[in-house]
């Protein structure tokens, strides 16, 4: 490993740690750049938002990301700040595993608008205006959901927005998609787990009800009444550095 990129949360403590890590790596003859997609690995210092930024930075490259937690939850991060030196040593010696994570491809009328690591959300653009959403899975009618919106999450995203809306936690080794309604009218409208190779389609059923599709809480696109929004596993992946097998420790301690 010759070059490492740092992606850092714009806050005092993460920035201080970034300086320490930069100095340590430089002493080991490693080139350090900030927000550079050309590195052999990325160290993301912050919370899950910083991780998402790092994954977006490297886009379709097979560059693994190591997260150091300075966030509120930090479920996607691997180590705590006090463990940074040991983590850096293992990174440089190659003593780690790389976990591949699925991304979700989002299309509007068969035109791709982006990939999501966590989730894509179809949601009302006007508060207190409920949507009527026709949902189909692999062409089969899955019902009309009356709700504020609908979340389509990857296993990675099952511990994020979907979880806060009552969705299940999915073991990171399971290949599936999770469909979770946001504030549904019917009490029986629960999450639905579908195979990962499924295509999920969503249509607005009532004209005049404004909606947007939001990808990983950042990118958004306005939807029209006649738009068809489709979701399927992307050909692109995200790659995370794993130093230990601790998914359920994170579930116990961080959720």
Image (spheres, grey):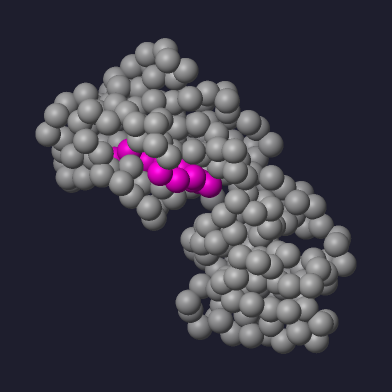
Q: Quadrant of residue 25?
A: bottom right
Q: Nearer the viewer, residue 131 or 31?
A: 31
Q: Is residue 155 left or right of residue 109?
A: right
Q: Is residue 250 visible?
A: no
* Residue 90, position as x, y percentages in the image: 83, 66
Q: Which residue: 17% across, 26% down?
A: 206
Q: Looking at this rendering, what residue extends furthest in the left direction?
A: 208
Q: Is residue 244 left or right of residue 70?
A: right
Give left or right: position of 227 versus 76: left
Q: Work out whether residue 148 or residue 106 is closer to the camera in this orientation and state it.
A: 106
Region of the chain picked out in magenta, as a range: 113-123
Q: Is residue 7 above or below residue 147?
A: below
Q: For this rendering, which residue is in front, 111 or 62? A: 111
User: Which x, y percent locates residue 162?
Assistant: 44, 40
- Reply yes or no: does residue 114 show up in magenta: yes
Q: Residue at x 79, y 72 (%)?
A: 2
157, above or below 96, in the image: above
Quarter of the rendering containing residue 58 = bottom right
Task: Give the camera-side residue of 158 and 40.
Answer: 40
Residue 206 visible in the shown view: yes
- Residue at x 69%, y 78% (from the top left corner): 32
Tell me the residue at 39%/55% (across/down).
Answer: 218
Give the overall secondary structure of the magenta segment.
strand
Coordinates of residue 168 in the picture (x, y in percent): 51, 34
Q: Position of residue 195 (x, y in %)?
A: 57, 23
């Amino acid at each position: 490993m010759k070059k490492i990129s740092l992606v850092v949360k714009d806050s005092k403590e993460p920035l201080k740690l970034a300086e320490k890590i930069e100095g340590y790596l430089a002493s080991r003859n490693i080139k350090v750049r900030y927000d550079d997609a050309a590195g052999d690995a990325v160290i993301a210092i912050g919370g899950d938002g910083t991780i998402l930024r790092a994954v977006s930075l490297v886009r379709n490259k097979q560059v693994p990301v190591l997260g150091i937690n300075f966030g509120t939850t930090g479920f996607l991060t691997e180590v705590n700040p006090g463990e940074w030196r040991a983590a850096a040593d293992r990174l440089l010696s190659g003593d780690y595993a790389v976990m591949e994570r699925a991304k979700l491809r989002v299309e509007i009328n068969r035109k791709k608008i982006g990939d999501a690591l966590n989730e894509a959300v179809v949601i009302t653009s006007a508060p207190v205006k409920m949507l009527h959403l026709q949902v189909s899975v692999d062409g089969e009618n899955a019902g009309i959901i009356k709700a504020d919106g609908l979340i389509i999450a990857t296993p990675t995203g099952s511990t994020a927005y979907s979880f806060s809306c009552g969705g299940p936690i999915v073991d990171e080794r399971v290949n599936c998609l999770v469909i979770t309604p946001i504030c549904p009218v019917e009490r029986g409208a629960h999450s639905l787990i579908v195979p990962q190779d499924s295509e999920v389609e969503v249509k607005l059923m009532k004209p005049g009800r404004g909606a947007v599709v939001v990808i990983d809480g950042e990118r958004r696109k306005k939807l029209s009444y006649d738009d068809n929004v489709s979701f399927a596993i992307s050909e692109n992946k995200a790659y995370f550095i794993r130093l230990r097998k601790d998914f359920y420790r994170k579930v116990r301690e961080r959720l």
